[in-house]
Amino acid sequence: MKVHYNYLPQEFAETSAIFDEWRILIESSDFTLGFYVEEFEKEFAKFAGVKHCVATNNGTDALILALKSIGVGTNDEVITVTNSFYATAGAIVAVGAIPVLVDCDDRFQICPKAIQSAITKKTKAILPVHWGGASPAIETILELASTYNLEIIEDACMGIGGSVGGKHPGSFGRVSAFSMHPLKSLNVMGDGGMVVTNDSDLNDWMRKYRNHGMISRDTIEFWGVNMRLQPLQAIVAKQRLQVLDETISKRNRNAKYLDENLSKLSKYVQLPNRIDTNVETFALYMGLFENRDRLKKFLKENNVEVKIHYPKPLHIQPAAQKSCIMGEKLTNSEYQAERLLTLPVHQYLDIQHMKYVCETIFAFYGYEDG
Ligand SMILES: Cc1ncc(COP(=O)(O)O)c(C=O)c1O
C-alpha cells in the first residue's frame, strides 16, 4: 500500500465544474475583482460567521493587510509564536514591525504565559497562530489583550473550517488572516487568501488598500498596492467551500483513528491533547516520535510519506537573528522540532490507509497490538 502526503492530483482529477465556470468568466472578461470574487467573499464571511471578508492573492498578503489595517508599523513589537510558517514573522517584518517570538505549549500552540512575559511598552499586538489547524487558548489570549490594551490579529491560515467552542478560527480578533495555499483545508489552484473583520471601517480601508487605494478609476485616496484575489481562483475557492465540511470530517475520522491507536505507544509517541469543544482542520496531524529520523526513513521505505513542520523554529532561522526579539525560554519548540512528524490524514485516505500507517509505526517500535 502507498500512503501519499499530497492529495492535489486526486482533488483536481475531476475539473469539469471548474472549467464550466471559468468559461463563463472568460466570456465576461471580468478579470479584476468582480462578480466571482465578491460572491466568494460573501460566502466565506457567512461561513466564518463574520461581517466582512476581503479576498487577497495569498495568506502572506492577508497578514500584511491585516497588520497595516490596524496601524502596526515601524518598531512596533508584535508577539507571535516561534513554531509557525515563515510568513508569520515575514509579514510582521514587512510592515516595519518587530516579531517577538515566544514558545509554544504541549499542544504546539502559542503559550499564554510566554505572551504575558514578553509584553513591553512597545507591544502593539498579539498574533496568535492556529497552528496545524488546532487552536491556541484564544479566550486567555483575548483577556491578556484586553488587560494590556493590545490588538489581536489571528493567523488562522491553517484554520479554515475549524471551530473553537462553536466559533470559527479567525472570528475572535479584530482582524484575521487565512491562506488558500494548495495544502490548506480550503485550497485553490495556486495562491489565495483572505482577511476577515467585523469592523466596517477596517473593511473599507482594506478594500481600498488591496486595490491601489482607488476610489474610482481615476482617483486614488491613498497609496495602496495590488493584493487582489484572481477571479479564476475565486471560482475554485467557491466550489471547494461547498465540500469543506465533508473534507474536515473525513480528516477528523482519520485523525481519530490515529489518536486511538498511536496512544498505545505512549512510551515512544506523544500526541497533543484534543479539546472536546474544538474542531481541528488537521491541516497538519503532528506528534512527537522517539527516534524520529529513523522512523521517518522506515516509513518512507514502507511507502508512507511524512513531513516535518518544521525542523527549525523561527528563532533559529538566520533571518531572525537581526530582525526578531526572542522570548525568554524557547525550549518546548526546540524539543519538539527534534521529534516532530506530520502524518498524512487527508480526505482521500481512509481507515485502511490509517491502519497501514499505524501497523508500520507499531512494527518500527516492535509493538504487538492486541
Ligand atoms: C501559519 C501560516 N501563516 C501564513 C501562511 C502564508 O500563507 P501563503 O502561503 O498563502 O502566503 C501560511 C501558509 O503557507 C501558514 O501556514
Image (tube, rainbow, N blue to C red):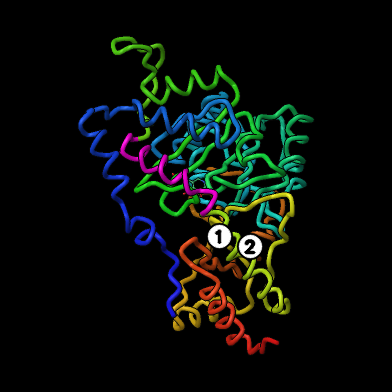
- Residue 315 visible somewhere in the drawing: no
Q: Residues within 10 Å of mark 1 (few under 14, many from 20)?
A: many
Amino acid on which the number 2 mark rests in the picture: Glu
Residue at (58% x, 66% y) in the render: 254
Q: Position of residue 62 (x, y in %)?
A: 47, 35
**Majority secondary structure of the magenta segment?**
helix
Residue on which disc 2 sits: 334
Compared to residue 125, the image places residue 101 above or below, namely below
Residue at (45% x, 78% y) in the render: 300
Would you say residue 152 sits in the magenta stretch?
no
Residue at (36% x, 31% y) in the render: 36
- Residue 249 visible somewhere in the drawing: yes
Q: Residues within 10 Å of mark 2 (few under 14, many from 20)?
A: some
Residue on which disc 1 sits: 251
Mark 2 lies on a secondary structure that is helix
Find the magenta span and give its range. Answer: 230-246
Would you say residue 236 sits in the magenta stretch?
yes
